[in-house]
Image (spheres, helix red, strand yellow):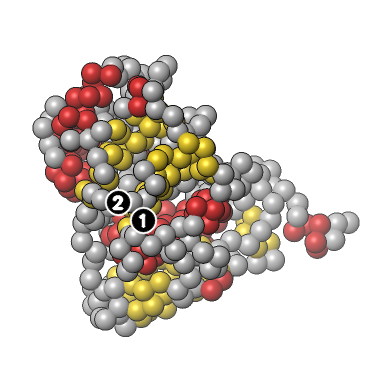
Amino acid sequence: MQSNQQLRRTTLGLAGAVLIGGAIAFAGQTVTTVSDGPHVFWQPDGRARVVALCDGVKSERVVEAADGFTLHVPCLGLRAVRIESDAPPPDDAVFTGVDRFLAIGDVHGEYDAAVALLRAVGVIDDEYRWAFEDGHVLFNGDVFDRGQRVTESLWLIYRLDKEARKTGGRVHMILGNHEFMALGGDLRYVDAKYLEGVVPALGMDYPELFGPETELGRWLRTRNTLVMINGLLFTHAGVSADVARLGLSIDEINDLVRTSFDVKRDALKSDPTLDLLRGVRGPLWYRGYFMGISGYQNASDDDIRTVLDQFGAKRVVVAHTSVVKIGPFHGGLVIGIDVPMSDEVGARGLLWTDGKFFDVDSRGERRPLQFD
């Protein structure tokens, strides 16, 4: 007969989530306890309902929040963060005179790898506090899906943005296709931890955890699709020449995409502009900058110059399409930064400092980028 310890380490087969000795077990994974949150739900009377899952145990409390409150959830290893009662305004999108920035590709819930990179570059200190002074950090979309620490990643970005503003810095979470997929109910890439553990334990559907009445949800709905820093256009996937020919400004595109956050994909077809922006030629999905991607016509250098001219940009920086190493494409008109990250291989980012571009990794090693 197996001991209790052996039973707790038994890997499940095709069964769903079950509860064993207070621990939630997932299909194909070792039996473990699960923690997630906090999830803050704003109530009609202005109070906030805070729900968290700590070691498989759900906790819930209602907070008087007219003047905001400080959120503490020790079991999740997150620093306390100040929550304001007023909804955040739409984020700014165009910046000049920025001396240094770090741009990071798809995080996909790989919290530890992202943290290691932030520490190596000096964005945060050993206590996870902002240390990048007036620098900017860009998360180029797709924080959601695939990994097991999506919520922790979101709260880290949320808190660092608040801390960065106090020293003249900024943190940008650019919206990607997986933000829209997960919050829109397309759960194909959501990890089993959430679907088989968190969701049944909290008694909510996954998109509800980030709905417009939640703190993370209303914050996500103020984020941008396009950000311009020092003439560099940052977006998740890319911008096609078709989008550029709409003649819209950066702010207009950001506003349109934000307002479509809770519009179902089928309903977008009645609006040709939104259908283009949210579709495969739009900034959430486009892959035309890279050769050999099935279903996409390759963008020419002239197509990319059409995009850059429309927005007054020098280059466009994209994630979404995985690359072997961070570097230039199309003669330097495009910089691809989505080197897949994990605990095993770490993470990489695009660093701009002292007037130069570097490919930097989670060990702090820098490789200068070469532009022909």
Q: Is residue 34 above or below residue 304?
A: below
Judge by depth and name the residue closer to the eye, 191 or 67: 67
Q: Earlier in the sequence, mark 2 or mark 1?
A: 2
Which of the image's four quarters has the N terminus?
bottom right
| x and y percentages locating residue 39 in the rendered image | 41, 66
Q: Residues within 10 Å of mark 1 (few under 14, many from 20)?
A: many
Q: Residue at x 69, y 47 (%)?
A: 12
Looking at the image, residue 126 sits to the left or right of residue 3; the answer is left
Looking at the image, residue 236 sits to the left or right of residue 13; the answer is left
Q: Residue at x 32, y 45 (%)?
A: 175
Residue on which the image places disc 1 = 135
Say if mark 2 contacts mark 1, CB within 8 Å.
Answer: yes
| x and y percentages locating residue 236 in the rendered image | 34, 39
Q: Label 2, label 1: how many angstroms apart (C-alpha)? A: 7 Å
Amino acid residing under circle 2: Val
Q: Is residue 257 above or below residue 7?
A: above
Residue on which the image places disc 2 = 98
Amino acid residing under circle 1: Gly
